Image (tube, grey):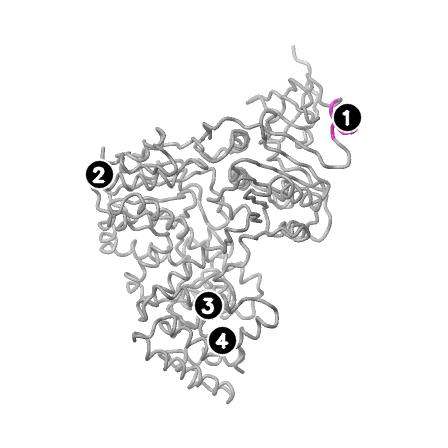
Amino acid sequence: MKFSQHYDAQKFMQPNSKQLSAIISKSLRSLVLAGAGSGKTYVITQRILYLIESLNIAPSSIIALTFTNKAAKEMEHRCLNLYSRTRNVTFTTFHSFGAKFLRQYGSYIGLNKFFSIYDDTDQIATLKRLYPDEPQSQLNEWRYYINRAKDYALTINEFHQVHQNPDQFQQVFQAYQAHLHNNNSVDFGDLLYLPLLILQQNPTVRAIVQQQWQAILVDEYQDTNRTQAALLESIISETTFLTVVGDEDQSIYNFRGADTTAILTFQERFTPVEIIKLEENYRSEVHILASANQLIAYNTQRFGKHLFTSKPASSQKVEIHQFETEDNESAWIVKQIQTNYQDDDIAILYRTNAQSRSFEKTLAEHRLSYQVIGSIKFFAREEVKLVISILTLLINPVDEMAFSRLLATPSRGIGKKSIQTIIAYHHEHQGETLLQSAIEAPVHKKAKQALLLIADVYDTVKKTLGSEVSLPQLFMHLVVSLGVIDYYKSKDLADGTDRLQNIYEVQKLLLSYENNAESLGYCLENISLQAESTDDVNIATRIKLITIHNTKGLEYNTVFVTGMEQQLFPKFDPFNPTNDAEIEEERRLCYVAMTRAKKNLFLSYAQRRYLHGRSLYQQPSQFLQELYHESHVAVINHTSTQYAESSQVSTAQQIYTVGRWVRDEDYGVGLILSSKFSKAGHLVLTIQFETKTATFLPEFRYLEPVIMPDTE
């Protein structure tokens, strides 16, 4: 078979049997359930080669859809290294696909192809402009529901599904969308929502797009929202090969609109479907996989997979560490890194950003370099957004957001009131550009002089657009002439920051684009899409501090999962009962955290933690009990009194005796079959419930003693 010569020898000498089944499937619809570390990218790339070589599908009619630019580039790079014909395959994100679609078909809804793409801060600024008297909390709420409405592909008549006041929300939604349309702009939700509307309303466009793609592959399918799932259905025909790869156990983005039911109901919506499970893990040690398997088995909304590895078991078990405070927790972890893991790549994971403070402080005290991943993204920085806005106005001169940024920074004597006057004048007189309206609008003399200078700069630069002057040169002329370089030069001197360097990084990005409106439009589109998904990652820094949501797709030799406490992880409000779906999402998040570890996994919790402005006593996370198994997990206590020697343990031993009945909140009433101490001195109970036999550590989980009536 021709296909056999294209195996990826760098990672696998040959695929395992399940991988091979996924690669050479002849089914039109296939669902590949790829467990953590099971080689899904390898399977997708080899599947693409198989489609080309063995099924004779033209590379130009194959598209691979991903959720991040990084994943798309990695997939493309792997394919090109194996087979040159794959250079005509399209590797792209859902949002990039939507943006390109709107450039081509946006005219069906009155959208110019040089539209701007608004991010989260632009959305809030737009709502603030529309509703200046509303509090920030209300604006944030509206933005959230606008995004959810688009994630769920809701019509106006369906707004009641996401908002308790659908009539009011309808008015806000329509005003917001009208504002975007008038500014020739879209937000990120629109990059999926609007293509879906166009496809649903225009059978001709739908037929053209369906004819274009003979094979579609989707990575991380568990992260799709309803709009993405519907968009996918709209672009496939009856003869399209559709391969989706995902893992319902790693669906952790519900708060962003991801819908786990998309993967759980895939078989029903695309029947007949071939389902293939990839369960062999090439990343983690046996003890890590065993405890992760035990944890995720508590979820009910899943297909069911059991990860295994061919690696021999190491002596290093998963470790649970108990501390008195979060400062004790961070001190011990930093000491471990210094003492035992000096040459390792290390990740300290936490549920919320606020937890990083204690680790940052301790690492700094020990002069250890570290990086906080998921802090301020490059494209979200003030100076970067400003210079991008300056470029945007060259090709989208009615973008009010970009225009407002330009006038506000650096200070030009043009206040908010003058900007509002200009925009109102522009709406009233329907000017061709905002700068033209600005010159004509009734503003004070100082503002008028500044506006004339800005207009003169843009007139000069527009004449060079399309000339032999390079795009980076044009950009630098703009930002220098508009006073941006001098402004940030003085700020950098004042506070020691590197804003100028960030502006030069933007200039560097322009090197690969030509000096014309079309190329600049694609450049700004790519920047907007990168801004949504790219974190700054310093590969040289071996210690990473990172929220668990930001760890998808990453792996580290040594992982510390911290703050394993009820209400923190799983995270929930004690005054607002958490439903089963939310707990299952939190459990999946814990599973993802655990399966980032290759060699060493440490889980920790504190008895007291400073939360909500005060020191609170904490209960250990229920997940610690769920993942515990004496063969794979060791428990170490760092508090002043060790459990095995404390009165708590002796009391627990007296209460939880063999033959005693207890009640658990999940399993109901059960009989204690055995009660013994582990080697580390922890009381371990084996309990027979009606549905299963389970092992418990009473220090992690409350078991209520009950008296059962005598039965004959």
User: Mark 4 — residue?
Assistant: 484
- Let me know if residue 165 is in the magenta part: no
Classify mark 2: helix, strand or loop: loop
The residue lying at 34 percent from left, 68 percent from top is: 520
What is the spatial separation of the Cα atoms under label 2 and label 1, in whole angstroms? Answer: 69 Å
**Nearest to N terminus: mark 3 or mark 4:** 4
Q: Percent from the top left, x then y, of residue 568?
A: 63, 44
Front position among marks 2 and 1: 2
User: Mark 1 — residue?
Assistant: 651
The residue lying at 30 percent from left, 68 percent from top is: 518
Q: Amino acid at mark 1?
A: Thr
Dots 1 and 4: beta carbons under 8 Å?
no
User: Mark 2 — residue?
Assistant: 55
**Toward which corner of the image does residue 218 lie, by quadrant?**
top left
User: Mark 3 — residue?
Assistant: 504
**Nearest to N terminus: mark 3 or mark 1:** 3
**Nearest to N terminus: mark 4 or mark 2:** 2
Residue 250 lies, with reference to residue 662, above or below; the image says below
Q: Amino acid at mark 4?
A: Val
Residue 701 lies, with reference to residue 375, above or below; the image says above
Classify mark 3: helix, strand or loop: helix
Magenta span = 643-653
**Nearest to N terminus: mark 2 or mark 1:** 2
Quadrant where the C terminus sits is: top right
Q: Amino acid at mark 3?
A: Tyr
Q: Is residue 513 left or right of residue 298?
A: left
